[in-house]
Image (spheres, grey):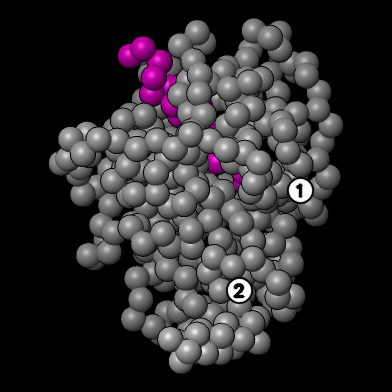
Amino acid sequence: MKLAIFISVVVGLVLIAEGVNPIGAPSQVPLVEEPAINPALIERINSKSTTWQAGVNENFKGWKLSHAKKLMGWKPNPNTKLPRVSFPPEKKANLPDNFDSATAWPKCTTIATIYDQARCGSCWAFGCVEAVQDRFCIHSAGSSSVVSLSFEDEVCCGPDDGCEGGDAGDAWQYVQDSGLVTSDCSPYTVPTCPPAQEPCLDFVNTPPCVQSCSDSESWTNSLHFNSNTYSVSSDQTDIMTEIMTNGPVEACFSVYADFLNYKTGVYQYDGQSQFLGGHCIKVRGWGVENGTPYWLCNNSWTTTWGDSGQFKILRGSDECGIEDDMVAGMPSSSK
């Protein structure tokens, strides 16, 4: 026992000495400044026998790690306690090997759309709003009515710190309590530019909350509410059943510098790269690639990052904590 403890302490000290945040531990290690696009890291990843390939992502050209770190806006709120949902064994039986919400509900075109949070730590809001609008379409009484909801409303008028970060549970609770207007009513005003022109602007402060529509709608009539908010059990079969039954969910996880250079395949932390922070995304499905199970996710860093804005991450082993923090809710039937 003493030997095991000694080895654990030594390993922890080595990780800290190398500037690496051990998975699951809060970061107390100062960031060592490096370019976000790291040719040596890319070569190291691609020389390994691993499940993913690294490469140059155009949206990070000219960035340093300290810039990329500002995108990681997940700030877990210890005071937010959500009910945890799981399913009975019979409901989880015969799950398919592969599932993509975009294919299951093809008329709901928002599911496959890749968005741009721009230079703002608003990932916590994007993961929520993306999944909420997907679910409104999926559960629209058979009409598959596409609705585009407002990132601006959640970021600027929501319960947390806007571009400085927030909590996924808080974001979903805001939809239940206050509702979200459409993107036509309140479009995203954090400056963005076409993917080919990224990066385009410095990080910005959170715009002010303006609760009046820029189109002809009234704010009140534009609101869409959820009827509840909950977290999903970390058991992968519960998460799969939730997605296949109700639609995409929001997930938050720890991000390391190697993830910035992801291009294709099933991402797994390389065990060496620096910790950058917590990030939230949308999980829309799952599958198996060359024998490796994965979650299929949409990021919010434009289509010039990763696999046209998407990525796959190892499923079933809580990679970077992704299965611990899955949040969802159901749209209200009154809207």
Q: State which quarter of the image contains the N terminus.
A: bottom left
Q: Is residue 29 above or below residue 301?
A: below
Task: Please say whether residue 112 is one of the residues in the magenta stretch.
Answer: no
* Three-letter code, disc 2: Asn
Image disc number at residue 248: none
Element at label 1: helix
Using the image as rendered, state which of residue 256 and residue 106 is in the foreground.
Answer: 256
**What residue is rendered at 72% in x and 33% in y?**
159
Counting residues from the start of the chain, the first of labels 2 and 1 encountered is: 2
Element at label 2: loop
In the rendered structure, the answer to whether residue 80 lies left or right of residue 163 reads: left
What is the x, y in percent for residue 162?
74, 40
**What residue is rendered at 56% in x and 74% in y?**
22
Number of callouts in the render? Answer: 2
**Extreme residue toward the left, this view:** 94
> How far apart are labels 2 and 1 at the CA level?
21 Å
Q: Is residue 158 visible?
A: yes
Image disc number at residue 21: 2
**What residue is rendered at 76% in x and 42% in y?**
161
- Residue 244: image quadrant is top left
Identify residue for label 1: 164
* Three-letter code, disc 1: Glu
Q: Start and end of the magenta stretch?
A: 123-142
